Image (spheres, helix red, strand yellow):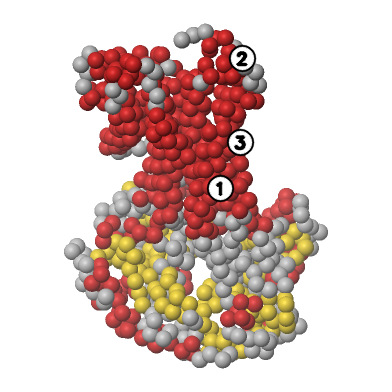
Amino acid sequence: MFKNYLKVTLRNITKQKAYTFINITGLAVGLAACILIFMYVIHELSYDKFHANADRIYRIGIQGNLGGDDVKYPLSNLGTGPAMMNDYPEVQSYTRLQSVPKWPLKYKEKTFFEENMVFADPGFFDVFSFPLIQGDPEKALEAPYSMVMTRDMADKYFSGEDPLGKELRLNNSHHYRVTGVIENFPENSHLRVDALCSIESFYVMNNRKLEEWNNFNGYTYILLRENVDPVVFSNKLPGFVDKYLAEMKKMLGESLNFFIQPITDIHLRSKLGYEMPGNSDIAYVYVFSAIAFFILLIACINFMNLATARSAGRAKEVGLRKVMGAEKHMLIKQFLFESMFFCFLSLILAVALVRLALPLFRSTLGIKLIFPLADMPWLIAAFVGFTLLTSLLAGSYPAFFLSAFQPANIMRGPLKSGASSSRFRSVLVVTQFIISIALVAGTGIMLGQLNFIKDKDLGFDKENVIVIPIMDRKLRERLPEIKSEIASHSDVLAVCAASDLPGGNPDYSAFVPEGYTKEETQLMHRINADAEMIPAMEMEIITGRNFSNEFSTDPQGAVIINETAARTYGWEDPVGKKIGFYTDNEMHEVIDRTVVGVVRDFHVRSLHDKILPLVLSNQNDYFDDIGVRIKAGALSGTLDFLKEKWMTIDPNRPFNYYMLDSKFSQLYQKDARLSTIIGYFTLFAIFVACLGLYGMASFMAEKRSKEIGIRKTLGASVPNIIVLISKDVVKLILIAALIAFPIAYYTLNRWLAGFAYRTDINPLSFLYSAAIVFVIGYATIAFQSVKAALSNPVDAIRTE
């Protein structure tokens, strides 16, 4: 029987080449899209699961209510890890990670600015399963000024030399000895680290106590022992806070507590501030999975639509088979076999398309996806099973529909497909175009939001600003001289200094505004800025004054707040109000500073985050960045000047800089990538839908060839024939648009809710999307319609 099924299938393929091409191509594109998205989903869901004890690794975070705001951060203090290890037998090991500033690292003549370096405990290799290629994991991070680096970093500095024992100079002042080489961190790790420095180095460099309980600026990971219930352990954490942070908890209205977070949840389910860069969102997995399903659904609809529409052409075949004794189940097997044959041909083509598209897909997503068949052979079985499922889904209706024909009805005369079959095909066409229109609308709205982000007034001008990080703390003492030297260039318009320029991650600190008690401590962003920052960034003082060098009390006694802070605290006349600054980590003593001005609200972070109360102070010992505003079009010459000038300002460190507008663009990189990928898959969906529409138009023209010939003989014009063939499908596209609009609106409104500042959903966007799909769909139909209308009516009428 198999041989017979194959023979009939090949005969039909030869007989109906166009139909075969449309089905195989449509399914191949749909399967290719699904495979690509499947690879992405597997990658995203695999984050941090490669650790041997992934189910027992947790990150410690802090949560509470401060000034009426619920705060939850993945941060902890340096004392947390050792204290938990000492107090709770459930904790098997711990490690703390503290970021190393972006300092230059030098070996002989090679100097690089390293961004991904952290201080870490020796327990790093107990908690995580990153393999150490060289060195002793128990001793590699014990001594001060010891360093473990990745394989790539070792190759970059030592070029084939044995790195163990070599010394590198960090920030031109600290000598680190290489004590180990670790394998490169895998792509599916939420930790992206190039080098680990012993945390003892951090203590030596900063002269800080081991237990610093009121400074939450690092990450702590713990490894729980086997069979420890994480919920039971979490219930013990309030007691831990009472023991070590009772004073702070009292000050915060008893709301302070620690929480633990499974490491496998961090990449997709952690939407916290101060996260390590690179996290994604589980919503993207859902969105891409839905798109894959819809594209495959469109491809399956094409198959069912064309197979059902052409059922009349195979009616006599079914009738003769039944007369010769074929049973219904045998016919079902025949048609399902044909469906599977098409699907497996499509799978082969889909794999080839995936290999062609993979480089573009990788670069767009920014992920080093691999075609995982060699590493995960079980995927071969998964793809085969997936294809079988697709073939059953796509071929089930035609198989049962065709096998149900009655021989007597078939032999009596031409078979009519019937109203129910026509309605079914109409439903399928409408479904295809609902998906296509919704995807086009989604792409349009997302691009609109990205343009809104690009064009929105941020409260300052981010264009033409060069930011130079201050590497050496001694430079702060020379800032007036340095700023003067930089400002001497004719293309430099202004020079300023600040702890954080917009686009960074400013401190989030506690204050006591006038009218509040210490028990009502408020949370505010804090930036230290000189008198030049506001004019240099083209910000606006709306009341009061800016900092001024003419007021000697400004550095220790004056502050500027933003409009949001004034509104939050109910200050109609903010100038002259007092804000209490805590002077010690234990938050015991408060010193008041006076508000001298209010700056118009500006965005310090992305538009995903709302503008929060902000306080600017004028303490020059906390300046970390120099901002240089230049004339438009003068970047190249000004950079050459700055590089040369910096050799005299800080000859021991190479010049390092970034552009402020590029920094802001990076904040929306994930959204831009999502929009681009959805745009690509939208094109796939429309292409597959139009393939089916082309096939349907061809069938309709063929089925009505005699009618068209007679109408032309009786005087019907070419436009009349085009309208005759296309009007029904056009109606279906319009119905699809009406159904797609509310679905797309609901989905996009949910996505835009993730932005604190968003564009409005313009109803015209939906009309444009419907118009785009309509034009593409109509053009597809019109091609076949024109072809039928221009054919010779004699050829159609004279043949039976």
Kindly identify which numbered label has been placed on residue 441.
1
Above or below for 447 versus 262:
above
How far from the left and from the top, in percent, is residue 752?
53, 59
Going by the numbered disc 1, the residue's amino acid type is Ala
Residue carrying label 3? 775
Which badge, 3 or 1, is on the more N-terminal residue?
A: 1
Q: Residue at x 58, y 43 (%)?
A: 770
Mark 2 Cα shell of 10 Å, populated few (<14), some (14-19), many (≥20): some
- Could you tell me which secondary element the residue under label 3 belongs to? helix
**Is residue 737 or residue 72 the one in the foreground?**
737
Label 3 close to label 1 by CB (< 8 Å): no
Q: Residues within 10 Å of mark 3 (few under 14, many from 20)?
A: few
Which residue occupies 30% across, 50% down? 50
Q: Is residue 159 left or right of residue 318?
A: right
Residue 166 seen by the camera: no
Point out the image quarter for the N terminus: top left
Residue 669 in the image, given as x and y percentages of width and height? 55, 52
Q: Amino acid at mark 2?
A: Thr
Between marks 3 and 1 in the image, the one whose residue lies nearer the viewer: 3
Q: Please tell me whether residue 96 is drawn above or below residue 519 in the rendered image.
A: above
Categorize mark 1 by other alpha carbons within 10 Å: few (<14), some (14-19), many (20+).
many
* SS of the residue under disc 2: helix
3D distance between C-alphas at marks 2 and 3: 30 Å
Nearer-the-camera pick, 669 or 180: 669
Tag 2 residue: 713
- Between marks 2 and 3 in the image, the one whose residue lies nearer the viewer: 2
Say which element carries label 1.
helix
2 versus 210 height, above or below: above
Image quadrant where residue 202 sits: bottom left
